[in-house]
């Protein structure tokens, strides 16, 4: 019973870390990555559609993303969607291929990105603490309902706190690694 609560808590914390890493892929560094365009949608026959579903995305060079649409008539729509996105990217095309050159980040923009990373890290830590609280509440309810002893409650709370500490450390390490990547010239 108690192990179920701890397992559920661990799974929740794992999902929190996965979510943080997914959020990090959307933070622009000086390098090209097709994940930058994950949230960009174009109107494809009346349906908002991700770019990856209307063409082939590639990173042939560290600072270049190319998009080869499956239908040539989509090139203008793709360019407009990228310009409308909040990414600060300027696409260009030759009628067959859309090229997006990733400009190097300025020092100020890098510092701004680091602030965003820290904020995302803090939000993840808050989520981890909420998951910890939910796990502890479940254990307290079990103890109140006489399903576990007081000693088991204390042991379970300690296990959940140890888990929380491990995951907070993972968040800090992830933020530090991404900051280092952003600050690279």
Image (spheres, grey):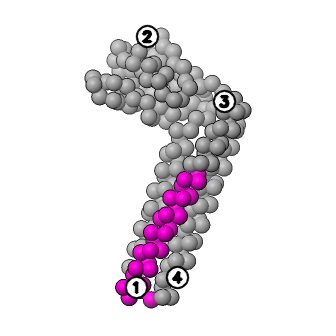
Neighbor class of circle 4 (other Cα within 10 Å; few <14, some 14-19, many 20+) is: few
Q: Nearer the viewer, mark 1 or mark 3?
A: 1
Quadrant in the rendering for residue 41: top left
Q: Which element is circle 3 on?
A: loop
Mark nearest the camera among 2 and 4 is 4
The answer to the question of whether label 2 and label 4 lie on touching residues, with beta carbons closer than 8 A, is no
Q: Is residue 16 above or below residue 182?
A: below
Mark on residue 156? Answer: none
Report crowding for label 2: few under 14, some 14 to 19, many 20 or more residues within 10 A (C-alpha).
few
Contact? badges 1 and 2 (CB < 8 Å) = no
Residue 49 in the image: x percent, y percent?
34, 30
Q: Which residue does the numbered mark 3 point to in the structure image? A: 105
Residue 102 in percent (x, y) is at: 59, 25
Q: Earlier in the sequence, mark 2 or mark 3?
A: 2
- Residue annotated with mark 2: 95
Among the two numbered marks 1 and 4 on one chain, the one whose residue lies closer to the N terminus:
1
What is the secondary structure assignment of the residue under circle 1?
helix
Mark 1 and mark 3 lie on one chain; the one further toward the N terminus is 3
Quarter of the figure with residue 95: top left
Decide whether residue 136 is among the magenta residues.
yes
Range of magenta residues: 121-149
Task: Say which residue appears at 47% left-offset and 10% top-offset.
Answer: 94
Q: Can residue 147 be seen in this view?
A: no
Give the number of the mark in front: 1 or 4: 1
Please determine whether, in this image, residue 24 is positioned above or below residue 123.
above
Between residues 15 and 85, which one lies in front from this camera angle?
85
Marks 3 and 4: CB-CB under 8 Å?
no
C-alpha distance separating marks 1 and 2: 69 Å
């Amino acid at each position: 019973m108690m192990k179920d609560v701890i397992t559920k808590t661990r799974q929740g914390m794992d999902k929190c870390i996965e979510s943080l890493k997914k959020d990090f892929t959307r933070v622009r560094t000086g390098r090209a990555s097709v994940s930058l365009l994950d949230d960009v949608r174009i109107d494809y026959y009346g349906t908002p559609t991700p770019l990856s579903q209307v063409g082939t995305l590639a990173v042939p060079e560290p600072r270049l993303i190319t998009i080869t649409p499956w239908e040539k008539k989509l090139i203008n729509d793709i360019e407009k969607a990228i310009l409308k996105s909040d990414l600060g990217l300027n696409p260009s095309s030759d009628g067959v291929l859309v090229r997006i050159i990733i400009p190097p980040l300025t020092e100020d923009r890098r510092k701004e990105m680091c602030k965003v990373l820290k904020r995302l890290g803090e939000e993840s830590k808050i989520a981890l603490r909420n998951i910890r609280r939910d796990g502890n509440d479940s254990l307290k309810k079990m103890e109140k309902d006489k399903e576990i002893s007081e000693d088991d409650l204390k042991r379970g709370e300690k296990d959940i706190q140890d888990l929380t500490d491990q995951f907070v450390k993972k968040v800090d390490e992830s933020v530090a690694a991404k900051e280092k990547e952003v600050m690279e010239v």
